Image (spheres, rainbow, N blue to C red):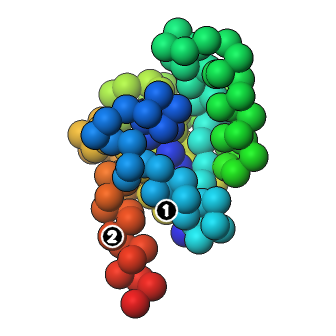
Amino acid sequence: MRILLDTNIILDIALQREPFYDSSANVFKLIDKNKIYGFVTATTISDIYYIAKKAKNHQLAVLFLKNLISIIDILEIDFKIIENSLKSPVLDFEDAIQVEASKKNDIDYIITRNIDDFKYSNIKAVLPNVILELLKNNSK
């Protein structure tokens, strides 16, 4: 299974945001154990750095990103993804980029806490606990 992690999921871990931390961290554990393949867009990396740096500091933001990219893959953003995102019915441009990059890279699910932001997406968006339950049921 190939999943794209929305920025909010990664920030839940980076900033240890409760009550979201545990479910997001459990998704990362499955990625780390190679049970699922995790991806983010290149634009998400810069967003994470900016927010983590403001909340913590430069050194911690960089350390977190180094650890992050050691277990997930980064989807490239090219002209066609930007062009399609500008035409997308997904209202938030950042989310539209994630959807278009997901379509181009055969992503199965977008993991997010903001399901409504992806209501016009061709890629199903689910909460972290939903993907955990789905994987649990598939392993039985």
- Image-quadrant location for residue 41: top right
Q: Residue at x 59, y 71 (%)?
A: 35
Residue 89 location, x and y as percent? 35, 35
- Which residue lies under the disc numbered 1? 108
Q: Report the quarter where the C terminus lies.
A: bottom left
Residue 33 location, x and y as percent? 64, 67
Q: Residue at x 36, y 72 (%)?
A: 134
Q: Does residue 32 appear left or right of residue 3 in this picture?
A: right
Q: Does residue 116 appear left or right of residue 15 in this picture?
A: left
Tag 1: residue type? Asp
Q: Residue furthest left?
A: 116
Q: Does residue 132 appear left or right of residue 78 in this picture?
A: left
Q: Report the quarter where the N terminus lies.
A: bottom right
Residue closest to the eye, 125 or 52: 52
- Which residue lies under the disc numbered 2? 133
Tag 2: residue type? Glu
Q: Residues within 10 Å of mark 1 (few under 14, many from 20)?
A: some
Q: Nearer the viewer, mark 2 or mark 1?
A: 2
Q: Earlier in the sequence, mark 2 or mark 1?
A: 1
- Image-quadrant location for residue 32: bottom right
Residue closest to the eye, 96 or 135: 135
Say above or below: 34 vs 78.
below
Residue 60 location, x and y as percent? 65, 21
Residue 90 location, x and y as percent? 36, 34
* Residue 116 in view here: yes
